[in-house]
Image (tube, rainbow, N blue to C red):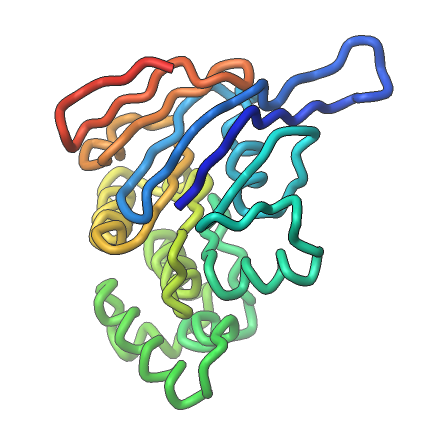
Amino acid sequence: MFDISQLTMIYDMDKEDKIYAINSVDLKLPDHGLVGFMGPSGSGKSSFMYCLSTLKTPTSGEIQYNSHSFSQLSRSEQELLRRKEFGFVFQRHFLIPYMSALDNVIVAATDKKEIAISRGIQLLEDFGLKKSDMKKRPGKLSGGQRQRVAIARALINCPNVLFADEPTASLDHTSAFVVMDILKEYAKQHLVLVITHDRSILKDADRIIEIWDGKIIHDQLISVGSKEES
């Protein structure tokens, strides 16, 4: 699905001491599976994910998604790609405070309202929310419930790729594992990319990629029991 070659992201280009957020990375990613990205703060993992999702433009290198080069897409085409193909979950849920849980889910829907409502209810039920909870505003929900609503919103359009940047960082471990179980199930038929500092939540990942100073230092294929070093 993704074919990345010589990807580089440099900050402070106009300064003598340039900062390499991503440094000549080559990587291929499949069309499904749960892939974890690990590394210390400032290692470049978030910049890497933002480049893959078209939210940032790399300094150089090539990203191909289903054989289409990002560099050949206009801004409007990139926006359409994000809307049709990608979903996003962040550490903060970014729910709209005056909307109900259900309305927060369907606000991003591209289907007709009745279809979106039906799918939104089904997603929230699958994630363990009661009908009464769906009517509540975010301030009346627990942290775990809010993050599940955020994930449901990200999945409302059935994206082929789900980008999750520290999706469990603000949760207790019990809630974090519930969230990861949801993502693992979705990853059976879609690609789910998770940035985290917590290796324990990647216990069921298919692959773990470690990034240090903008370079991949370890690429472990867990599901097939083999390891590759990059």
User: Is 222 above or below relative to 104?
Assistant: above
User: Can you give x and y, in whole percent of width and height, for residue 157 in the image?
Assistant: 41, 69
Instruction: Answer above or below: position of 59 versus 57.
Output: above
Q: Residue at x 58, y 39 (%)?
A: 51
Q: Residue furthest top?
A: 17
The correct choice, above or below, for 15 with respect to 54 in the image is above
Q: Quadrant of residue 225?
A: top left
Q: Residue furthest bottom?
A: 114
Is residue 223 shown above or below 30? above
Residue at point 36%, 25% (across, down)? 209
Tell me the residue at 33%/53% (across/down). Answer: 144
Say which residue appears at 25% left-offset and 63% top-offset. Answer: 127
| Residue 162, position as x, y percentages in the image | 40, 51
In the rendered image, residue 124, in percent from the top left (x then y), is placed at: 29, 69
Closer-to-camera residue (32/152) = 32
Nearest the viewer among 201 and 80 is 80
> In front here: 17 or 97?
17
Report the side of 108 relative to 31 (left or right).
right
- For the view shown, which residue lies furthest in the right direction? 14
Q: Residue furthest front?
A: 67
Quarter of the figure with residue 115: bottom left
Q: How many marks?
A: 0
Location of residue 38 in the rendering, given as x and y in whole percent from the top left corner:
39, 25
Residue 122 position by quadrant = bottom left
- Name the quadrant of the C terminus: top left
